[in-house]
């Protein structure tokens, strides 16, 4: 039986854009907030463009390689759809996307090898957490101040834990000067830190969700994530690990929808 080659799908950035979309939607669902379809389109399209920028555009420009015309057209169309999705939104929404867009553009710069915020020691994981948590919570700013802080804190914890398996795989390719968490703490200690962060997220789950069923579903998904982190190894296929890790928010959203529908 032939194995399905998922590498092109993973490298297309569609999977991670879908993961970002699901992550943002599940946080809104937990607060009883409906995200406009236009904003959902903007999140997915700009998320896809951002990761294509990291993995395709910047390397092509740095190495002076020719860029495929079809990919350029696709990037342009996705950007246009994202802008169209924001056309009727408030200034606050625009400012949020501009802020995240600026951080994204500075994350990796196309002017030379290893230029950008991601190459500042210890900073990479926190920049990703800032961008994802900002997009996941910007629509919830009307919540009470303390409640919003708890939601935002939980979002950051989630992203930090989600990135750990990928950071462990990147040990084979990341420069020692980056000082990523696995480089600084070692694999065993960074896994232990992940379990502590998962426990903190479990506590926050009960404090931030509007319905208990959603809190219990979140705990189940956090346990699944903990098992994945326990089993991750640096010598395993990164594409397979990316598939599993980035599917976690999609699983979370799907289970939350089923929980609200049938429970």
Image: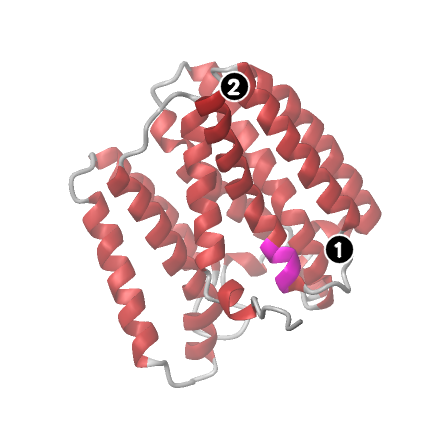
Q: Secondary structure at mark 2?
A: helix
The chosen color scheme is secondary structure
- Please count the marks in the image: 2
Determine the residue positioned at 23% across, 54% down: 81
Question: Chief secondary structure of the magenta span?
Answer: helix
Q: Residues within 10 Å of mark 1 (few under 14, many from 20)?
A: some
Q: Which quadrant of the structure image shows residue 221?
A: top right
Q: Secondary structure at mark 1?
A: helix
- Indicate whether residue 22 is drawn in magenta: no
Determine the residue positioned at 34% across, 53% down: 46
x, y (%) of residue 167? 67, 55
Residue 216 visible: yes
Q: Please give the residue where the numbered disc 2 appears in the rendered image.
A: 208
Please state if 149 lies on the left or on the right of 230 as rendered.
left
Residue 183 is tagged as 1
Q: Residues within 10 Å of mark 2 (few under 14, many from 20)?
A: many
**Closer to viewer: mark 2 or mark 1:** 2
Observer-nearest of 182 and 195:
195
Residue 123 visible: no
Looking at the picture, does residue 146 appear above or below residue 124? above
Looking at the picture, does residue 192 appear above or below residue 78? above
Q: Residue furthest left?
A: 88
Determine the residue positioned at 27% across, 72% down: 73
x, y (%) of residue 125? 59, 49
The segment highlighted magenta reads 239-243
x, y (%) of residue 263? 51, 18
Q: Earlier in the sequence, mark 2 or mark 1?
A: 1
- Indicate whether residue 241 is drawn in magenta: yes
Please state if 29 lies on the left or on the right of 178 as rendered.
left
Q: Quadrant of the N terminus?
A: bottom right
């Amino acid at each position: 039986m032939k194995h399905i080659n998922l590498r092109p799908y993973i490298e297309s950035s569609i999977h991670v854009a879908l993961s970002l979309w699901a992550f943002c939607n599940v946080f809104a669902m937990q607060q009883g907030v409906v995200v406009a379809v236009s904003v959902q389109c903007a999140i997915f399209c700009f998320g896809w463009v951002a990761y294509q920028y990291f993995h395709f555009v910047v390397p092509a420009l740095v190495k002076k390689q020719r860029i495929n015309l079809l990919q350029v057209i696709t990037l342009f169309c996705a950007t246009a759809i994202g802008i169209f999705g924001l056309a009727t939104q408030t200034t606050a929404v625009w400012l949020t996307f501009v802020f995240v867009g600026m951080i994204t553009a500075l994350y990796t710069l196309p002017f030379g090898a290893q230029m950008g915020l991601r190459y500042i020691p210890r900073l990479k994981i926190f920049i990703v957490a800032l961008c994802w948590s900002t997009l996941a919570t910007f629509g919830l700013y009307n919540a009470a101040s303390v409640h919003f802080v708890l939601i935002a804190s939980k979002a950051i914890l989630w992203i930090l834990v989600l990135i750990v398996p990928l950071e462990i795989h990147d040990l084979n390719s990341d420069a020692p000067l980056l000082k990523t968490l696995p480089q600084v703490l070692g694999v065993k200690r960074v896994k232990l830190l992940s379990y502590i962060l998962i426990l903190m997220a479990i506590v926050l789950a009960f404090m931030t969700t509007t319905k208990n069923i959603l809190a219990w579903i979140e705990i189940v998904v956090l346990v699944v994530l903990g098992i994945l982190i326990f089993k991750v190894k640096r010598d395993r296929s990164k594409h397979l690990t990316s598939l599993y890790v980035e599917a976690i928010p999609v699983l979370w959203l799907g289970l939350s929808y089923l929980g609200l529908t049938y429970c």
